[in-house]
Amino acid sequence: MCCGHICQIFVTNKTEFLLGGDYIAAEKYYGIWNLYAKEFQFGICEPSKKKAWKRLWNKIGYDSYKWRFSIRVIPPNMVGSVCNRIRR
């Protein structure tokens, strides 16, 4: 039972949300999380961890090995803002 909260059902690379009795399917996206700044950076938004690391490597090279960068699942409510942000 949902109890008024958002219910999540993980199915492979898809997440389904129960909002007011309606199911909304959304893909899981991965982004680059900066542990120091506590935010998603570089506007990288990929469907797999491997692709996210590859895009980070292509963007900043060896600096991608620093301890501060990690791959995290982007919360569904932040996908639009993280994927559309371009840092220069």
Image (cartoon, helix red, strand yellow):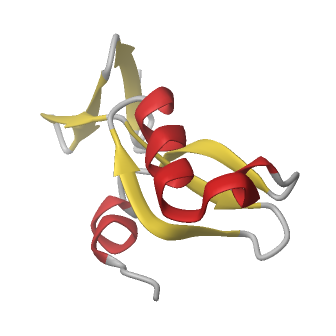
**Which residue is painted at 32% across and 34% down in the image?**
47
Q: How many marks?
A: 0
**Which residue is painted at 49% across and 62% down in the image?**
59
Q: Position of residue 44 (x, y in %)?
A: 41, 58
Q: Position of residue 87 (x, y in %)?
A: 46, 84
Q: Position of residue 8 (x, y in %)?
A: 40, 28
> Vertically, is 13 above or below 39?
above
> Vertically, is 3 above or below 20?
above
Q: 7 or 67: nearer the eye? A: 67
Residue 68 in view, yes or no: yes
Q: Position of residue 25 (x, y in %)?
A: 17, 32
> Vertically, is 47 above or below 12?
below
Left or right, 17 with reference to 75 = left
Q: As drawn, which residue projects farthest toward the bottom?
A: 88
> Vertically, is 17 above or below 57?
above
Residue 2 in view, yes or no: no
Q: As drawn, which residue projects farthest toward the top?
A: 12
Q: Quadrant of residue 40?
A: bottom right
**Which residue is painted at 62% across and 42% down in the image?**
71
Q: 2 or 82: nearer the eye? A: 82
**Which residue is painted at 40% across and 42% down in the image?**
6
Q: 51 or 8: nearer the eye? A: 51
Left or right, 27 with reference to 51 = left
Q: Quadrant of the N terminus?
A: top left
